[in-house]
Image (cartoon, rainbow, N blue to C red):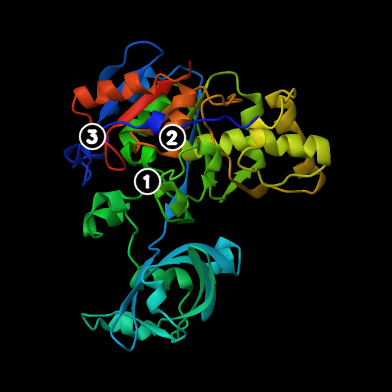
Amino acid sequence: MIPEIRIEDYNYNLPDERIARYPLSERDASKLLLYKGESPSEQSFAQIAEFLPEGSVMVFNDTKVVPARLHFQRETGAHIEIFCLEPVLPEEYVTMFEVTDRCRWKCIVGNVKRWKSDTLFLYNPEDDCTVAEMGLKADLIERRGETSIVEFSWTNGAPFSRVLEICGSIPIPPYLNRETEDVDLERYQTLYAKYRGSVAAPTAGLHFTERVLDSIAAKGIEIENVCLHVGAGTFLPVKSSLVSEHTMHREPFVVTRSFLTKLISRKGKLIAVGTTSVRTLESLYYVGVKCIEKGCPDDVCQWEPYERKYEYSFEDSIQAILDYMERYSMDSIQLGTSIIIVPGYEFKVVDILVTNFHQPQSTLLLLISAFVKGDWKNIYDFALRNDFRFLSYGDSSLLFRK
């Protein structure tokens, strides 16, 4: 049954000065709120390994943020901002970043009403020669509600990854209320980012440094990776009064057969770094259910976990995916998830969560509430009283599931 949840019950007062506009000088210099089911305490992120159970498996999201924000200009002089969301033609991320002449993306277009049918030319106010040589243009193919299909074309034969690198900017969150700066090129990216495709960083991972990762490994904690490309929907607040009326965005994810084997054979706790890792890991259970019941995997729908009682064990579910992959000689599997995790959700795998502090009335705050069995106010009140920094560049928390 879909839970009836009022989003106003997940509101709190977040003073503007508590939003971290910029990162700290050192990634691991942030505070760490430790919550093990009772009173929260303040720690240092640099010492996070001390609080992690030995023998655990820690899962990171190794997606990489792309410079997905582009500024164009009409012949009339009007400026149009285009925010690339996900590839349409070609559809695969790897292939998309390799194309050398034209491609199509689903985009959010600012001032779209002012864009008729004319071709847009990249805005290049400083007459940068490298930018000009790209010859990047944009044509509006189709409008689809709040998004549009845009075709990009360029003339210098560079792969599209290079085009974005030269012409685009990192899409920092709108609540930072500033333009992208040089510091964001490095710091709005995790140290271990590998696979291009996100338009927002998995921000829980921004705190990790080599010395922190070394201290985690020294404690006998195994490190594994999944890849979920974070969409712009992560910025969107819940606008409907009832959460059941909110539509979640689909995000693509990839997991390997070796990771699933590790997941099913682990003995210790499973630690997810970030809500994107949680959504990937929990979605895997329902992918496995499809393999059991339908013989093949498929995307996970928003309310699927709440539609009925699932009796399969997590091990049975993951084994069903592994059996499918072995049958078709697959080393990895790519799917999508629109899963929403709200109070009442039954967690299947994640025991411990590393995460930042999230916006009021957001789906991420709902996930936190589900994870700590409704005790989110206790946690957030402590953070506010003790001068923790909030949102993407803010401080961190280590939450043990109740």
Residue beneath disc 3: 389
Does residue 157 lie above or below 330 as drawn?
below
Residue drawn at (44%, 82%) of the image: 116
Identified at 30% across, 40% down, the residue is 391
Mark 3–mark 2 distance (CA, rounded to whole Å): 23 Å
Q: CA distance from mark 1 to mark 2?
A: 31 Å
Q: Is residue 289 above or below residue 82?
A: above
The N terminus lies in quadrant: top right
Residue to which mark 2 is pinned? 7
Q: Which residue is labeled 1 in the image?
A: 190
Q: Which corner quadrant of the image does residue 203 belong to?
A: top left
Q: Quadrant of residue 324?
A: top right
Task: Tell whether label 3 touches label 1 (CB within 8 Å).
Answer: no
In this rendering, the count of numbered labels is 3
Residue 333 coordinates in the image, percent (x, y): 67, 48
Going from the N terminus, do you reach mark 3 or mark 2 first?
2
The reply to whether callout 3 and callout 2 are in contact (CB within 8 Å) is no
- For this rendering, which residue is in front, 360 or 152? 360
Q: Position of residue 304 (x, y in %)?
A: 66, 37
- Residue 129 placement (x, y as % from top left): 27, 84
Left or right: 26 in relation to 236: left
- Which residue sits furthest front? 241
Location of residue 236 in the rendering, given as x and y in whole percent from the top left corner: 42, 49
The amino acid pointed to by label 2 is Ile
Q: Secondary structure at mark 2?
A: helix
- Camera-side residue: 317 or 342? 342
Dot 1 surroundings within 10 Å: few (below 14), some, or many (20 or more)?
many
Q: Secondary structure at mark 1?
A: loop
Foreground disc of the pair 1, 2: 2
Q: CA distance from mark 1 to mark 3?
A: 18 Å
Please tell me which of labels 1 and 2 falls first in the chain.
2
Camera sees residue 261 = no
